[in-house]
Image (tube, coloured by chain):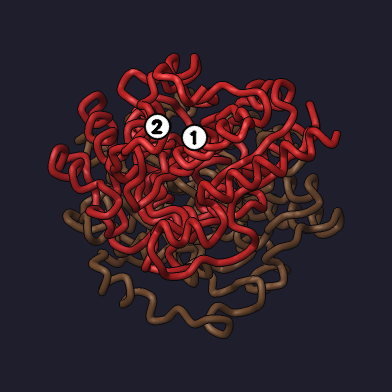
Chain colours: A red, B brown
Amino acid sequence: MSSTDVMDRAAREMHLLDYRNGAELKQLPTRNGFGEGLIEAGNRNENVLAICADLAESTRMEGFKKAHPAQYLEIGVAEQMLVAMAGGLASTGKVPWIASYAMFNPGRSWEQVRTIMALNETNVKIAGAHAGVSVGPDGATHQAIEDIAIMRVIPHMMVVVPCDSVQTKKATLALSETFGPAYLRFAREKSPIVTTEETPFEIGKAQTFRDGDDVAIVACGILVANALIAADELAREGINCRVVNNHTVKPMDAPAITAAARECGAIVTVEEHQVHAGMGSRVAEILAESHPVPIEFVGVRDQFGQSGEPTELIEHYGMGTEAIKAAARRAFKRKVAG
Amino acid sequence: MQSLTPERRKELELKANDVRQGIIRSLLSAGSGHSAGSLDMADIFTALYGAVLRHDPARPDWPDRDRLLLSCGHIAPVRYAAMANFGYFPVEELLTLRKFGSRLQGHPERVKLPALESTSGPLGEGLAQGVGMALAAKLDQKDYRVYVITSDAEHQCGLHWEAMMTAGKFKLDNLTCIIDRNFIQIDGSTEDVMPLEPLAEKYRSFNWEVLECDGHDMASILDACERAKHTTGKPQVIVAKTIPGKGVSYMEGDYTWHGKPPNQQQADEALRELSAARERILAHV
């Protein structure tokens, strides 16, 4: 499939850029998409507010601050306050987006998130910036790799992890217009852009980015690009992988996950997060109940991160394309062994 | 400043007595819950619902209503009893406190009963939400006020101080924090567990207007609320001196009543005492 000029049906339907054969893809940080989406959300609705805990530039709220100064609030380094105050604002019809590093919000503010945002069903949106080990040189204290786990267990909470900066913009707008508590997770480092303006996006709807029926690679966040590249290379070995962009961790698209398991017979999950209790764990929960198949988990394995360059860290913690390929081979072998 | 007529005073004191009886009945029915703090805030809740707040029990979603948040959610029985006595729901419903299927959860849940304004119980979080509501009023140029009831012990929580700082920064003069200064917490006296004094000075240094009142004297409570309302450019705190368990003599001042309900015999005794107090208020000219 990869040797032809025309991309597969799934990639065409999703209006993806051609990532095959080592194509050079343009790279931008997913946080840029958040910044653009937030400005647009503020244009569309004057009730959209942005509140930042002293990280306007690095979370990309800076643009909103300039575009909509009357809708922008600064409260300093106070993440619990960020959540609680936003809850109060939301009770009057505001749509507050609150931003810090994912490590601090929801990392530090979890109980406020549970009580004030979720139990109280308020329309507060968390922008979790600098998620994953790809934060790089800042080291383990600033690398949130447990945030999906602590957010996905909270009732009512939406958890969205878009795959590139173009999709992050769409996710920001979609969440701004969907009532309910939500967590949007994105990264610091630039990463390949695979989607286009035409690529559809709907919260809760997983997207097949590549056709295949030997193994399904279910990925989220910036590692979706690695999954696509791994799949392209595996095709040359004769393993045809489906790639699912599973951007909504909660509510997860259970029918799409079950269909992938039924049609491919083996699953690899890929996320820049602990394999324990993350996106892949939710996939496993769904399949254990609906259609059990061999699953291999790609992610951090019960370790903390460390300082280093983003790509170096992704490789070190076993989330590079070679690691994904190896996981797919293992899953395929287990499936064939039956 | 409005003066409190003797008739009005009598009316409010009778209402506070009803609220106290409601607290005792609901705690007895529940078999668990917090007695001391609930009883000691009966006068303040009565004053607020009866003479301070702009509210309409028939329209809990009225956009221009004043907001009343109970930050220390464990004293929910006093809020429920006050709400019932001011027409938010039938007084009989108080007997469902803490029971399966009830709107009157052990700690307040706004989704189940929207007039509560917030979901509370985890301490130190009410003022922060009140800051958000007061800020929204400023952004929307609305004139509603926000009142937040706090316990003294929850001033040991860091988030409360973040909220104090933020309220000062935004000069939220539409925000009033009322402290139930009864000096008790679960493990003993607040000043032994983790000293809070000088509390008033701490607020002043955070750019708050500090007011004080006797939390069991209607005139003193209303006077402090009136002065708070007329403060401009600053949030206000009212340090209300209260006696834990107020109105039930065997509970008064005893911190061991913080987190337990009366049994049948104790409740009977409390209700006899409150009924006698009611007769005295009626007889008073």
| Callout 1 touching callout 2 (CB < 8 Å) | yes
**Residue A19 numbered mark, or none:** 2
Q: Residue at x 60, y 23 (%)?
A: A212
**Residue A26: percent from left, percent from top:** 28, 38
Q: Chain of mark 1?
A: A
> In this picture, is B265 found above or below B133?
below
> Given the image, on which type of amino acid does mark 1 rest?
Leu
> Given the image, on which type of amino acid does mark 2 rest?
Tyr
**Residue A228 numbered mark, or none:** 1
Question: Are both tags, 1 and 2, on one chain?
Answer: yes
**Residue B152: percent from left, percent from top:** 49, 68
Q: Chain of mark 2?
A: A
Camera-side residue: B172 or B227? B172
Q: Residue at x 39, y 38 (%)?
A: A22
Tag 1's secondary structure?
A: helix
**Residue B37: percent from left, percent from top:** 60, 61
Tag 2's secondary structure?
A: loop
- Can residue A253 be seen here? The reply is yes
Q: Residue at x 58, y 81 (%)?
A: B193
Mark nearer the N terminus (1 vs 2): 2
Q: Is residue B137 left or right of residue A139?
A: left
